[in-house]
Structures are given as structure tokens and as C-alpha cells.
Amino acid sequence: MYELLKKYIPDDHSRQVNSEYYIDYIFQKEPKIKKVMDLGCGEGNSVDLFHKKNPNIKWVGVDIESSPEVKSRTRTDVEFITYDGIHIPFDNNHFDLIYCRQVFEHVRYPQKLMKEIHRVLKPGGYLIGSTSQLEPFHSYSIWNYTPYGFYLLLKGAGLQLVELRPGIDSFTLICRRYLGRPGFFTKWWEKESPFNLISSFFGKAKRTSPKFVNGNKLLFCGQFCFLVRKPKETAGKKKNKL
């Protein structure tokens, strides 16, 4: 897997991250983002993260009609839209950014939905978020993705993978589920989880690169985070210019 995805594994650091990492990253790179969709928004609390970056951002939450997360939604201060799990009810090239945190493992038709994401993103727009690789069943989850499988899903929809980073490790998630989800495991979404700490320790001991440590963590992660971009120009448009 490391050799297949080496181009997309960063070498700047090997810390465990979560989906919020890429919110910070994108707003440092593209501070003029105005239209944001949270796809699979659940309770809709990501709006607070984005309004901290820019209170004038036009945020909309999109989700299916019924899920455990949707049922627990209480806020009424932002816009929520219901969709059928495939067709996103917005015009082509509408959003600067789509945020999708731990959603794709619950999507019944991921190939169709990914093409819809491509359609509603502006050229040069971003898809950021996270999904599961080796995570036990939760909240009607259907799939687990390998990083390579997710890359192929993106490629099939015409989207460009920019980079992948490891999230919480799979061993921690499995132990958490086996023990009945005790609360003290929550800290390991924010801090380096146990197996990731071990991977970092051996990486430093062997003086391996951050890229290699990231690759090792991605191989065994329970969740991974992604930064994806819609190309500014399609191949067809480029050919027409020749």
C-alpha cells in the first residue's frame, strides 16, 4: 500500500489527526472560502467550527431523513436539507468546500454519491473529512475503506486525492467497542492513540521518515483523513484549447 500511495502520503510530520485538522489547513490556504456543505451533517455542530474561521460563511447541512445522529439534532439556527443519499439538491459548481466526517462508511451507493460531490463542487474546490478503515460496526455502517480503495473511488468520480493522514488506530477502536465504549477512550481522538504512539516511537528509534511512519499508521488505522480537490479544468476542456 505504501508504494501505491506514496505520492499522497505527507512527509512533513507523522502525527495522528482528525477531520478538523483539514479545516485549519484549508483556511490557511484558502481563506476566501464562502460556501460550505457538511455532507452527512448529523447534529450539525460543524457549523461552529467553520464560523470560528469566518462568521460570514454560508454553511448548509445535508443528511438523509433518518439516522441516529439526525434524530438527536436539536439546533434550529442553521439551514438543514434532507436528501435521498445520492442526489445532492444543489446546482453544478456550487460549493467551495464539502466537509464529510465519518460518513462514507454509511453510504449505500458511494460511487454515485462521489460523482454528485464532483458535480456540486466548484472547479478547484475541496472535499475534506475522514472515514473508516478497520473500525467495528457502528450506526448502521456498511463499508470500511482501505486508503487505496478510497483513492480508486475518488479517481472514478474525477476527483484528485491530495493527501491522506492517519487517524485513530484500529486496535484502540476495537478495544473500545469490545469494552462497551467506555468514556476514557474519547481522548484518543484528540491525542495520539496507543498503537500510533508505538509506531511513532519505533519510527524515531529507527530514524525513519515521517512519510514512512504515516504509511505504517495508515496500514493499521481505524480511521483516516483525506484532502481531495476537484480539478480546475477537465481533460476535455484542455483538449479543446489545443
Image: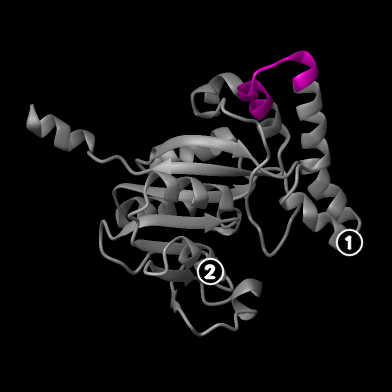
Q: Which amino acid does label 2 sit on?
A: Asp
Residue located beneath label 1 in the image: 180
In the image, residue 232 sits, relative to residue 121, either above or below, namely above
Crowdedness near tag 1: few (<14), some (14–19) or many (≥20) residues, C-alpha within 10 Å: few
Q: Where the C terminus falls, by quadrant?
A: top left
The first of marks 1 and 2 along the sequence is: 2
The colour scheme of the drawn protein is: one colour
Number of numbered discs: 2
Q: Where the N terminus falls, by quadrant?
A: top right
Task: Give 9 or 117, whichever is nearer the viewer.
Answer: 9
The picture places residue 136, in percent across and down from the top left corner, at: 76, 52
| Residue at x-position 35% and y-position 56% | 33
Mark 2 lies on a secondary structure that is helix
Residue located beneath label 2 in the image: 48
Residue 67 shows up from this direction: no
Tell whether label 2 touches label 1 (CB within 8 Å): no
The picture places residue 36, in percent across and down from the top left corner, at: 40, 62
Magenta region: which residues? Answer: 204-215
Q: Where, by quadrant of the figure, is residue 204 drawn?
A: top right
Mark 1 lies on a secondary structure that is loop
Q: Which amino acid does label 1 sit on?
A: Gly
